[in-house]
Image: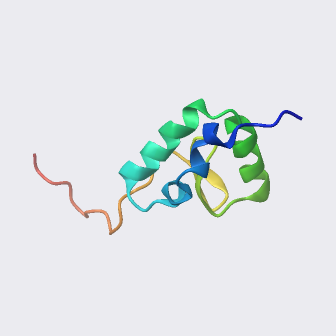
Amino acid sequence: MDLIDEAKIPCRTDPDLWFAESPEDVEFAKALCGGCPIQKACLERALEREEPWGVWGGELILRGTIVPRKRPRGRPRKHPVAA
């Protein structure tokens, strides 16, 4: 097994970003995973463990499944806002 330089693994520098509340921060974390040398293995293992939440391997996981994006906090509007 090759040793990987931890400086090349983005989540090792600011782990809180991968569990962020804001949708913008979550998207930023997902983008940082793009160049990670263990991205595929990270995602596979997170799905195996059924991680409850966070960004793993460039994907957002909630309740053990991949979701496309994080919704902002609060309830959605009942009626669309007129533009």
Could you say which is closer to the camera, residue 33 or residue 48?
A: 33
- The answer to whether residue 10 is visible is yes
- At 58% from the left edge and 30% from the top edge, which residue is drawn? 35
Residue 14 on image: x %, y %: 52, 54
Q: Is residue 75 left or right of residue 34?
A: left
Q: Is residue 27 left or right of residue 58?
A: left
Residue 79 on image: x %, y %: 21, 59
In the depicted structure, whether residue 37 falls above or below residue 10: above
Residue at the far right in the pictured view: 1
- Dividing the picture into quadrants, the one containing residue 2 is top right
Residue 80 on image: x %, y %: 20, 54
Quadrant the N terminus occupies: top right
- At 49% from the left edge and 37% from the top edge, which residue is drawn? 31
Residue at the far bottom in the pictured view: 74
- At 33% from the left edge and 69% from the top edge, which residue is drawn? 74
In the depicted structure, whether residue 28 falls above or below residue 17: above
Residue 58 on image: x %, y %: 58, 41
- The answer to whether residue 69 is visible is no
Quadrant the C terminus occupies: top left
Could you say which is closer to the camera, residue 24 or residue 79?
A: 24
Could you say which is closer to the camera, residue 77 or residue 26?
A: 26
- Dividing the picture into quadrants, the one containing residue 77 is bottom left
Q: Is residue 57 left or right of residue 27?
A: right
